[in-house]
Structures are given as C-alpha cells and as structure tokens.
Amino acid sequence: MTGKPKLALYWAASCGGCDIAVLAIDDKILEVANLFDIVLWPVAIDAKVRDIERLADGSIDVCLFNGGIRNSEQEYMARLLRAKAKVLVAFGSCAHEGCIPGLANANSRDEIFQYVYKDSPSVDNPQGLVPVPDFEVPEGTLHIPVFYDTLKTLDQTVPVDYYLPGCPPEAENIWTAVQAVAAGLAGAPLPPTGTVLGAQTTVCDECKRTRTEKKIKVFKRVWEILPNETECLLEQGLVCCGIATRGGCGALCPVVNSPCIGCHGPNEGVQDFGARMISALASVIDSDNPAEIDHIIEQGIPDPLGTFYRFSLAHSLLRRTKLGNGNGAAQHAAVPAGRTA
Ligand code: SF4
Ligand code: SF4
Ligand code: SF4
C-alpha cells in the first residue's frame, strides 16, 4: 500500500460504457493513478472481493459505482462498498436513475425470463430451462446470484453521497468530479451530500439553436427528416428532451443534429422527468382538439414509456414502491450464498 487515498470502481447492472468513459479521460487516467491507490476496478485490475472484505470499514476514500442493482451479488457489493467507502458516488445514469436496465421494471422477473429464455425468436431451449439460484451437482450445490424482480437504483439500496449524471458521464465531468473529491479529501469543502455533480441548468440553456415558440402539428422520428442545423429540433418536430434535462454536456447531441434523449436525468428542481417532458410537449402541439392531440401523440410517439422514461423509470414517480426481490428470494438479498472471505 502506498499511503495515497484509496479509490474503488465497480460495475453492477451496466453495459460497460461507464468504465470505458473513465478511460476516455485519456492520459489523465495516469494522474488518477498518481492521486489514488486503485484497490478495485474489475475491468482493469485483478483485485478480489475478499481483498475488499478484509479492509477496515471506511478505509476506501471514494468509490465510483456504476450500474443498477439487478441481483443479489450486486446488492452485496453495494452494501460492502458502502461500508468500506467514505464517499460513494452513483456514477452514471444506471446507478443514478436505473437507465436502460430499469426499463425492465415494466415487466416482472417471470415475464423477463419467459421472453429471454423461452419466447425470444433467437432462443433454442427445448427443455424450457431457466436459471435457478441453487443447483445440485455431484460435487455439491452450485450458486448463482438471485435475479431480482425489480431493478433498484444505488440509492434505493444504500445511502449515496453524490451522483454523477450521464449515459455515460462525459470525460470532462468525470475528471472535474475526481479532482473535486481529491481536493475534498485534502481538506477543501465538499458539496453537500446528495448533490448531483452536474450543471444546475438545462440542455436547452446550453444549446445554440434558435427557438421561436413555433407550434407543431406532427412529431417526426429521427430517421424521417434531415433537420436543419440552426433551428430548435423540437420546433422541427423531433422530440428533443433538452428542456427537461440537466445540462453539463454542452448540448452534445443537438450539436451533432440529434435530439437530446435525456441521459443526464431531470434538471434541478424537477422531480419527474417524464411528467416535465409531457407538459413541455403539450405546450408545443398546435391544437386544442383532444382527439387531434391524441392522434398527433400516437402517430409521433409510439413508445411513450421509452421516450419519457428511457433513463429514469426505476427512479421516477412511476417507479415500483415495492422493491422486494420477488418469489421468495429475500433470503439471498444481503450476502450471496457461498460467498466467503
Ligand atoms: S449509464 Fe449508460 S454507459 Fe453507463 S453503464 Fe448505464 S447504460 Fe452503460
Ligand atoms: S429543445 Fe433541443 S434543440 Fe431545442 S433548444 Fe432545447 S436542446 Fe436545443
Ligand atoms: S444532449 Fe442530452 S442525451 Fe445528449 S449527452 Fe447531453 S444530456 Fe445526454
């Protein structure tokens, strides 16, 4: 051990993009290695869980945790790292709001298993097998993590100190956050617990496109038009979520002619991203006729859940209030069976 502050990075139910985003800080990754002793980072170093279990509580200075909590092993790691880390950061949209994995909360575990292991056209499973947490073999019992009924965000599992938004967070914001935490560990004031380490303003506030309060009669899909590069995309009929989305990315998507899909989550003061977007869209539809409004929405927004809650369903007002593990799996919630130091 080096005497430097200790840093852990972990991935739970994630796509791996957040770990790639850390590498996108380029050569500054060497500065991170200079600033911190990296004790856990499954994608990059061969540290073992038992090494973390042996550390004293509070001995990791900061943990960047990406991904949601989909199974018992991930919950175990979230609880373990919460106990060991002074500062726990929900890193990226999956840990922050559930993101794409959280959209599965529109279905039960049984429905997910039914489709994934039986009904999906690409599946060949004549015996209809599905995973079970405990499986007997001649050598003993094999254990795999219990797949939960509900995907939970990190703060629905353990207390979280800070949130770094984005799918994934942008490299500059990662570097700024790492520097801020490093300075805080050296005595500088840290932001209040619960702070989202992003802009207080919206993506619209950062967007250079011209807005004229033009109303629209039809929403268009991105593949249906080639938008011009100066006018507001929403006013050109594309569902751009910049008005409801926390800034800090420099309006990255509108800059390249693509609508903001809301990956930074709701902006400061907005409790529910989808509700804010729905009210924003209501104000741009050029009709007072309820039937016509219904038609415009049905034609232009065929997937309202995916459009308005793509990143935030697990954390939204529509979230499940019952966060049980489903089907008698509670006994596996805290420590995966078979896990020993
Ligand atoms: S926030 Fe986005 S990039 Fe990060 S793990 Fe989730 S899906 Fe992947
Ligand atoms: S709605 Fe989109 S395109 Fe229009 S100003 Fe806001 S971010 Fe820019
Ligand atoms: S413009 Fe929207 S979707 Fe694109 S990076 Fe920024 S917050 Fe995310």
Image: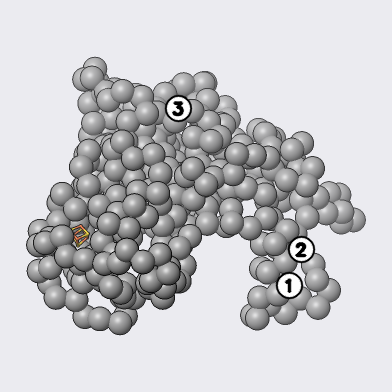
The residues bearing labels 1 and 3 have C-alpha atoms spaced at a distance of 41 Å
Q: In the rendered view, tell whether residue 228 sits above or below residue 161.
A: below
Relative to 204, 104 lies left or right: right
Q: Position of residue 7 (x, y in %)?
A: 38, 34
Q: Which residue is mark 2?
A: 130
Crowding at mark 1 (Cα within 10 Å: few <14, some 14-19, many 20+): some
Q: Nearer the viewer, residue 190 or 93?
A: 93
Measured Cα–Cα span from mark 2 to mark 1 = 8 Å
Marks 2 and 1: CB-CB under 8 Å? yes
Q: Which residue is mark 3?
A: 85
Counting every numbered tag in the picture gives 3
Which of label 3 and label 2 is nearer to you?
2
Q: Which mark is in front, 2 or 1?
A: 1
**Residue 285, labelled with which disc?**
none
Looking at the image, residue 172 lies above or below residue 185: below
Give the residue type at disc 2.
Val
- At mark 3, the secondary structure is strand
Of badges 1 and 3, the one in the foreground is 1
User: Residue 149 location in percent, x, y?
Assistant: 67, 49
- Of labels 1 and 3, earlier in sequence is 3
Q: Is residue 148 left or right of residue 174?
A: right
Residue 66 seen from this side: no
